[in-house]
Amino acid sequence: MSASIRRISIIVEETLSEMGVRLDRPIRKAAAVAVVANPFAGRYVEDLTPLIEAGAELGDLLGRKCLAALGSPPSGIESYGKAALVGEDGELEHAAALLHPSLGQPLRDLIGGGAALIPSSKKRGGPGRPFDIPLGHKDAAFVRSHFDGMEVAISDAPRPDEIVVAVALTDGGRPLARVGGLTVSGIGGKDGLR
């Protein structure tokens, strides 16, 4: 792997009830979070290709770890998201290089598709700083029941010369979703939107 990984953490949430109402089935979210060295910390570099290439490897690695943590077949995945927290000696473009050009396709390949854009966020901060992984339905961005997020934090990362990269997968939307809009059963699957 071209990324120099210091640590990988896996976080699993399982929601069984909401507001005292027992769910028909638990909703599970998993995040796989890697702490990686930032080879460009403290300096401006025009060509970010090494981070772009590392993004592809991380999309596959972190996606596999999420699937394993959920114990779900790829067909059971409904939502996804990605995020990065760059240490203070890095720039937001370093996070973007990891997340955008190439992380998504290996993740989609693992789960058997995903027509919708993978929601993402980028942030700068120090060790222990929480950050959110935005979530959305993998095949139709307009499915409101799946507009969600998952907060993660790593107590000793990122150091100034590191980036924390996270991928999240879920097997459902928000518990007790009821704000209307396109439903999962109504997805047409033609354009990644509806």
Image (cartoon, helix red, strand yellow):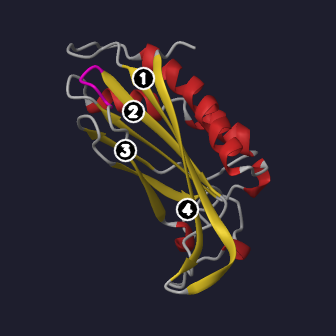
Residue 89 position, x and y percent, is 21, 22
- Using the rendered view, name the quadrant where residue 176 is placed: bottom right
- Tag 3 residue: 153
Disc 1/disc 2 C-alpha distance (Å): 6 Å
- Kind of residue at badge 3: Ala
Which one is nearer the viewer's eye here, 63 or 103? 63
First reached walking from the N terminus: tag 1 or tag 4: 1
**Alpha carbon separation for disc pair 3 and 1:** 14 Å
Q: Which is the main secondary structure of the residues drawn in magenta?
A: loop
Q: Which residue is mark 4?
A: 141
Determine which residue is flagged by label 1. Answer: 36
Q: Of circles 3 and 1, which is in front?
A: 3
Apparent side of residue 79 relative to residue 128 in the rendered image (left or right): right
Q: Secondary structure at mark 4?
A: loop
- Read off the magenta span: 157-161
Q: Secondary structure at mark 3?
A: loop
Dot 3 surroundings within 10 Å: few (below 14), some, or many (20 or more)? some
For marks 3 and 1 on the same chain, the one whose residue lies earlier in the sequence: 1
Q: Is residue 57 above or below residue 105?
A: above
- Tell me, yes or no, whether the two marked residues, 3 and 4, touch with CB atoms within 8 Å: no
Q: Secondary structure at mark 2?
A: strand
Q: Above or below — where is 11 with respect to 141?
A: above
Mark sitting earlier along the chain (1/2): 1
